[in-house]
Image (tube, rainbow, N blue to C red):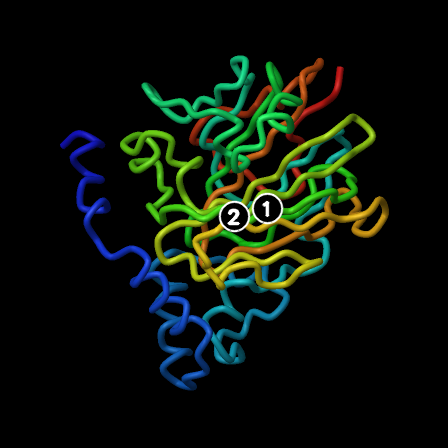
Amino acid sequence: MSDRLAVLPQYIMPKRALTTLAGKFASAHLGSLTTAVIRRFVARYDVNMAEAANPDVASYASFNDFFTRSLKPGVRPLASADLICPVDGTISQFGSIDKDQVFQAKGHRYSTTALIGGDALLAARFDHGHFATLYLSPRDYHRIHMPCAGQLTRMVHVPGDLFSVNPTTARGVPGLFARNERVVCVFESAHGPFVLVLVGATIVGSMATVWHGQVNPPRTGQLRQWGYTPGQVALRQGEEMGRFLLGSTVVMLFPKGPLQFNAHWAAARPIQLGESMAQRQ
């Protein structure tokens, strides 16, 4: 079956209703039922609870508490690199931006302007720059950390669809990451601006940042944005910046300039928070 045929049911399924329902269940405190669901999830996806700061599945009051669990100190050491990997997951794609076009999968590209919510002036700062798209599967640790030190200047919640973001859907849905609901975080760093985009998906109940808390819901259907003064939100490399309440994808944009990605990186390769992502040359 072709990827386009495989994703066809997603066009007609009630994705928003399913996501709302899943979000309500994930946040509910249901006692033994919650524990049973978590145990089943751990077994189904082979979740490594030995790395969790709290490995006792029975102690989590809600599925969201389990899903956004913290890690034990020291299990993700930070590499000595200009840019470190901000998540546990799998590499979807990475490389150079072709003028303003980001490679999604064979036969599919999308514009940086569309990704960040329509701001062409901001998008132009990344013309001929670099990108990395990282997929977080259900078994992964779902907090997002800073690839380098940065100061937040803007956050934008862009309404959109809620397609799945798994590899099959990335190959089958044109412009997937620029059409799904997303939270765009714009930073300034010692090497210039960078953008970190949290992309929503089917069943992703919400996304949150450490400075704002839960960004969605609400889902107003309107683009919402917040501005930040210099120094108001300053985060160190490796510091937590946000989390998914049920997993998804992170897309990063970096400006034009000499940047060498990790020589071991390749599409579909598993990655871990803290490993070297790229060096400035």
Which residue in the rendered view is the most extreme toward the left? 1
Question: Can you tell which quarter of the image residue 40 is in?
Answer: bottom left
Look at the picture and state if 39 lies above or below 106.
below
Q: Residues within 10 Å of mark 2 (few under 14, many from 20)?
A: few
Could you tell whether 245 is left or right of 72 in the image? left
Residue type indicated by callout 1: Val
Measuring 53% from the left and 80% from the top, which residue is drawn there?
59
Tell me residue 118's x, y (percent).
52, 33
Q: How many marks?
A: 2
Q: Secondary structure at mark 2?
A: loop
Left or right, 183 with respect to 275, comes to left
Using the image, tell me which numbered label, if any, was put on residue 200: none
Looking at the image, residue 199 lies above or below residue 245 = above
Q: Is residue 59 left or right of residue 262?
A: left
Q: Residue at x 62, y 18 (%)?
A: 129
Residue ranking furthest to the front? 222
Quadrant (top left/top right/bottom left/bottom right) for the C terminus: top right
Residue 196: give x, y in percent of width and height: 61, 39
Q: In the rendered structure, are the residues bearing label 1 and label 2 in contact, judged by CB atoms less than 8 Å apart?
A: yes
Q: Which residue is mark 2?
A: 223
Give the label, 1 or 2, closer to the camera. Answer: 2
Label drawn at residue 156: 1
Precedes in sequence: disc 1 or disc 2? 1
Residue 186 in which image quadrant: top right
Q: Nearer the viewer, residue 187 or 74?
A: 187
- Picture quadrant of residue 52: bottom right
Frontmost residue, 139 versus 232: 232
Does dot 1 land on a helix, a strand or a loop?
Answer: strand
Residue 202 at x, y percent in the picture: 35, 53
Callout 1 environment at 10 Å: few (<14), some (14 to 19), or many (20+)? some
